[in-house]
Image (cartoon, rainbow, N blue to C red):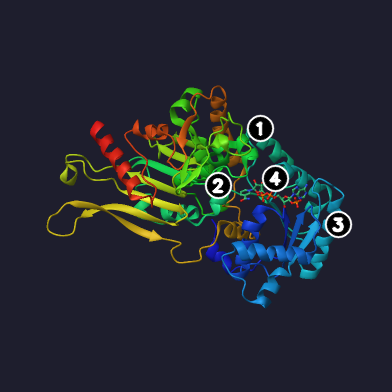
């Protein structure tokens, strides 16, 4: 597993970090700040250099000042000490290259060899492709043709999502990069796996008797996973129109969280043992027929509404979006994992844009106490809930029933609360992921069989959706999605638990639904 603490004491591995797409958004907002944080935490190797690659002409000094402005804008550490900053920035170099042109790679290779010599690096490389996916295959094969992959030292390739847009395209992409890199050299990023509380799931589960002993269908009623955004499609319409929420969020982030929640304890806390258990979850995930897709999967699209008091347009009015678009900006689904542990326990997932609140959260709803017994005669006891908060608040709380203080009696729910990021300074996902990749730990990256099984599951849903768009539901921007998503749970006698931190009005309305379910069930 990501042995964050253990690895700190290990010797750092010398390497050159080659960043393709060094002038892009991801590099500026995430990668430079992450490298700077690792520098401030003394977690970068001493013998280390970064080479930024993009098409535009620039000098090393010009590139370094771009890195400075990115760090000043987005990093969690301030740049205060000039000497310390110089020590960091002087390791950054820039190399202009159109990645499609094979000739330019020879000069890049020569630069890396000079830097190997300067920093005494034994040929170790990380190639990070922060570029549009259509370049991944070209870069990998040009690296191979120019001999980057056959020199002394280890080589690792980090690639961003999306990994294909369906199973077939993912297979083609995988085939292309596999010609240059072995599976254990490929680090496919799903940045959710770098999030503190996602990594914490296995510790919460496997380091606490309290949870692991009840982590099954005897004690758990259902599990709910929400990842909601308040932003709309922004400038990404060209990509999003083809992708939609199913491919953009469910195939990767949502299924990764399902796997972390549902996996069996691995035989050892080693990368491949953990990944094997995650893959088994996907193998047990029930695949749906087109009729079952209509029954268990809800798709929605936002219409004009208000976010934080501001009027926002509907999806079809967004720049670059087809006015008749049937692209889903919201998905809710009921999943079943057909194995002994989870038989009969629904996993409800929902994700969408322009929702009421930005939040990623998992709720484990435990079974209710028997009715007509002791305290639950009136069916007034709420179930125990374990709420794992992933973003923006990191932490968890456990809802318990306790006696109302005082003499009148009665029972009230209380939350035992643990906040991970209330104390400042938890590392960003990319810090952890870059650090792991530098140490050759691929636990929190996705393996090819995970990616391909996830596509198989998602492709069946897309295929069912292609036949007709009559089931596309609409929801007003600034709400929790279409009514159909509530019905999905109501049919089973459940409801979505309000995401932590919702307004008191919203909490009240959900509680009313809860009461209604009780009355009619
Ligand atoms: P971006 O802002 O469009 O940046 C693309 C980069 O690629 C630029 O540095 C561009 O530089 C370079 N580039 C384009 N064509 C090139 C060519 N022919 N040769 C060499 N360099 C070329 O993209 P991004 O938002 O950073 O996204 C990069 C990747 O990360 C994508 O796969 C995206 O899906 C993924 N991703 C991004 C985010 C995010 O927050 N941005 C989040 C998750 C995943 P020049 O134009 O100067 O050549």
Q: Count the marks: how many?
A: 4
Q: Which residue is mark 2?
A: 275
Which mark is nearer the camera, 4 or 3? 4
SS at mark 3 in the image: helix
Q: Earlier in the sequence, mark 3 or mark 1?
A: 3
Residue 516, horizontal then vertical, whole percent? 27, 35
Please identify, in this view, whether the residue under mark 2 or under mark 1 is nearer the observer. 1
Q: Is mark 4 within 8 Å of ligand 1?
A: yes
Q: Earlier in the sequence, mark 2 or mark 1?
A: 1
Instruction: Find disc 3 in the rendering and name its residue.
Output: 107
Q: Position of residue 205 (x, y in %)?
A: 42, 52
Task: Name the mark nearer the viewer: 1 or 4.
Answer: 4
Q: CA distance from mark 2 to mark 3?
A: 38 Å
SS class, disc 4: loop
Sequence-wise, the earlier of marks 4 and 2 is 4
Residue that mark 1 sits on: 168
Query: Which callout, 2 or 3, points at the residue further toward the start of the chain?
Result: 3
* Residue 246 visible somewhere in the drawing: no
Which mark sits nearer the N-terminus, 1 or 4? 4
Q: Position of residue 470 (x, y in %)?
A: 50, 23
* Badge number at residue 132: 4
10 to 276, vertically: above or below:
below
Local SS, label 2? helix
């Amino acid at each position: 597993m990501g042995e964050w603490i253990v690895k700190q004491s290990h010797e750092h591995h010398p390497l050159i970090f080659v960043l393709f797409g060094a002038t892009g958004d991801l590099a500026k907002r995430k990668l430079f700040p992450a490298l700077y944080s690792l520098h401030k935490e003394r977690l970068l190797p001493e013998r280390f250099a970064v080479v930024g690659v993009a098409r535009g002409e620039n000098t090393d000094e010009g590139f370094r000042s771009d890195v400075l402005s990115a760090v000043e804008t987005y990093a969690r550490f301030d740049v205060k000490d000039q000497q310390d900053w110089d020590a960091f920035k002087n390791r950054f170099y820039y190399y202009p290259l159109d990645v499609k042109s094979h000739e330019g790679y020879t000069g890049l290779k020569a630069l890396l060899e000079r830097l190997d010599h300067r920093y005494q690096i034994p040929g170790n490389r990380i190639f990070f492709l922060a570029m549009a996916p259509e370049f991944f295959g070209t870069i990998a094969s040009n690296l191979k043709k120019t001999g980057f992959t056959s020199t002394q030292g280890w080589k690792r390739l980090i690639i961003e999502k999306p990994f294909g847009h369906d199973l077939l395209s993912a297979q083609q992409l995988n085939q292309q990069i596999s010609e240059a890199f072995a599976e254990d050299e490929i680090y496919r990023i799903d940045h959710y796996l770098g999030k503190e509380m996602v990594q914490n799931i296995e510790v919460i589960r496997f380091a606490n008797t309290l949870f692991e002993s009840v982590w099954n269908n005897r004690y758990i009623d259902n599990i709910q996973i929400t990842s909601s955004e308040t932003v709309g499609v922004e400038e990404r319409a060209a990509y999003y129109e083809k992708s939609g929420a199913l491919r953009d969020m469910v195939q990767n982030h949502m299924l990764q969280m399902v796997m972390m929640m549902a996996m069996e304890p691995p035989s050892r806390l080693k990368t491949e043992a953990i990944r094997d258990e995650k893959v088994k979850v996907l193998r047990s995930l029930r695949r749906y027929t087109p009729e079952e897709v209509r029954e268990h999967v809800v798709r929605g699209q936002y219409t004009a509404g208000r976010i934080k008091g501001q009027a926002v347009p509907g999806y079809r009015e967004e720049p670059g979006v087809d006015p008749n678009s049937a692209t889903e900006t919201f998905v809710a689904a009921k999943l079943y994992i057909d194995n002994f542990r989870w038989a009969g326990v629904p996993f409800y997932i929902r994700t969408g844009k322009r929702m009421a609140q930005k939040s990623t959260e998992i709720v484990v709803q435990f079974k209710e106490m028997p009715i007509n017994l002791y305290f639950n005669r009136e069916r007034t006891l709420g179930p125990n809930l374990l709420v794992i908060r992933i973003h923006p608040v990191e932490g968890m709380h456990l809802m318990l029933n306790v006696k109302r203080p005082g003499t009148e009696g009665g029972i009230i729910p209380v939350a035992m609360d643990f906040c991970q990021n209330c104390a400042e300074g938890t590392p960003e996902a990319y810090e952890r992921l870059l650090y792991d990749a530098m140490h050759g730990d691929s636990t929190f990256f996705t393996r090819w069989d995970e990616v391909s099984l996830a596509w198989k599951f998602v492709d069946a849903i897309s295929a069912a959706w292609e036949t007709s768009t009559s089931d596309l539901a609409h929801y007003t921007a600034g709400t929790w999605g279409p009514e159909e998503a509530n019905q999905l749970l109501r049919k089973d006698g459940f409801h979505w638990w309000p995401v932590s931190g919702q307004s008191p009005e919203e909490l009240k309305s959900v509680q009313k639904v809860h009461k209604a379910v009780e009355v009619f069930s």
